[in-house]
Image (tube, rainbow, N blue to C red):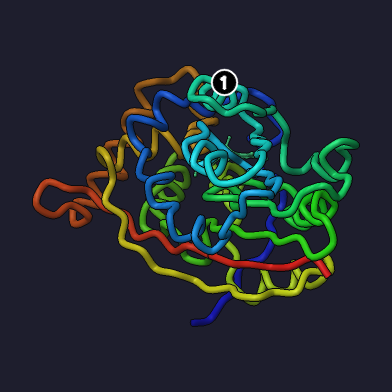
Amino acid sequence: MVETASAAPATQQQSDNKDQWSSQKYDKHASFVPALGAPVLRLLDPKPHERILDLGAGDGVLTVELQKQCQSVVAVDASADMISAAQQIGCKDARVVDGHDLVDDQELASGQFDAVFSNAALHWMKRDPQRVVEGVYKCLKPSGRFVAECGGYMNCSEVRTGLHAALKKRGHNPEDYDPWFFPGTKTYTRMLEQQGFRVDSIELIPRLTPLNTDIKGWIETFGFTFMKPFEGDEETQREIREEVQNNLKFSQDDGVWSIMYVRLRFKATKI
Ligand SMILES: C[S@@+](CC[C@H](N)C(=O)[O-])C[C@H]1O[C@@H](n2cnc3c(N)ncnc32)[C@H](O)[C@@H]1O
């Protein structure tokens, strides 16, 4: 597979600090995300004595699983709403931290963690993905491992293309509102090695993913940055969701909507 993903400039949205994540929408439209986290948890293989950092922990569904299997887990996420939901379901140590700021976090980035785990979150940290890798490195003990799955090259391409077309049609440059960094294996290997990690395994995994609801629900939950030019204009936002879904009619089979996800799953060790 040819892989050409590269780090992109910050979007206009990312300079906006408003929390646009909703744990309620996440639970309603996207509970499949943590539910599909088992393979990356297996790759992590947590041990009872270990201290683990869950980066981009979201509403804490996987963090709670991790808590059962190791000594302690710190959950971090940029969204206060998600962290509040994580606390409510029993995450003992859940904090609002942007992945880009880990590197400067005196407490977390002091080489105390046996492993950093991340599911479905790294691709949102687009402003400076290399800085995120640097932060992870600083959090780990020597020989600590970084085990993660995130969106990879060509992830969710149909719906992403639909959103780009909808914005272009309305006179906006979609690149300015696209929040995702979907790297290929070569790109991310380079980034990990540049930081001093040894890459133990890395692969792109195409995964046809049935949705809880439909494409419109998915866009409501994950496509909020594309709605930035239409803030306050609920009608246009609704029209865009309808339009993208109508153009993806073939993504429905027997009443179930699906999106073709491509996951980047890797394990790396601090050397
Ligand atoms: C799709 S959710 C995944 C949540 C969880 N790991 C799971 O498997 O359910 C992505 C999460 O990444 C978080 N996120 C996005 N940008 C972030 C950033 N810059 N720093 C930390 N977390 C971020 C979001 O707030 C959201 O909770």
Q: Residues within 10 Å of mark 1 (few under 14, many from 20)?
A: some
Q: Residue at x 78, y 72 (%)?
A: 193
Instruction: Give the x, y percent position of residue 253.
Output: 13, 54
- In the image, residue 239 sits, relative to residue 246, either above or below, namely above
Ligand 1 within 8 Å of disc 1? The answer is no
Residue 173 visible in this rendered orientation of the protein: no
Q: Quadrant of ligand 1?
A: top right
The image position of residue 134, as x and y in percent, is 82, 55
In the image, 86 versus 73, the foreground residue is 73
- In this view, the residue in front, 214 or 175, is 214
The C terminus sits in image quarter = bottom right
User: In front here: 155 or 63?
Assistant: 63
Tell me: 50 left or right of 64: right
Classify 154 as above or below 57: below
Seen as rendered, the residue at the extreme bottom is: 1
Looking at the image, which residue sits at the far front? 49
Q: Measured from the top left, where is residue 51 in percent x and y?
A: 71, 45
Task: Name the residue at 39% across, 20% down.
Answer: 234
Identify residue type, mark 1.
Ser
Q: Nearer the viewer, residue 174 or 9?
A: 9
Residue at the left extreme? 254
Q: Is residue 58 left or right of residue 144?
A: left
Per the image, the residue denoted by label 1 is 84
Q: Is residue 8 left or right of residue 161?
A: right
Q: Is residue 148 above or below residue 19?
A: below
Residue 228, quarter of picture: top right
Q: Residue at image x 27%, y 44%?
A: 245
Describe the element under mark 1 as helix, strand or loop: helix
Could one spot residue 259 in this view of the protein? Answer: yes
Relative to 22, is 57 above or below? below
- At 67% from the left and 28% from the top, the residue drawn is 93
Whole-percent x, y for residue 27 in the image? 38, 31
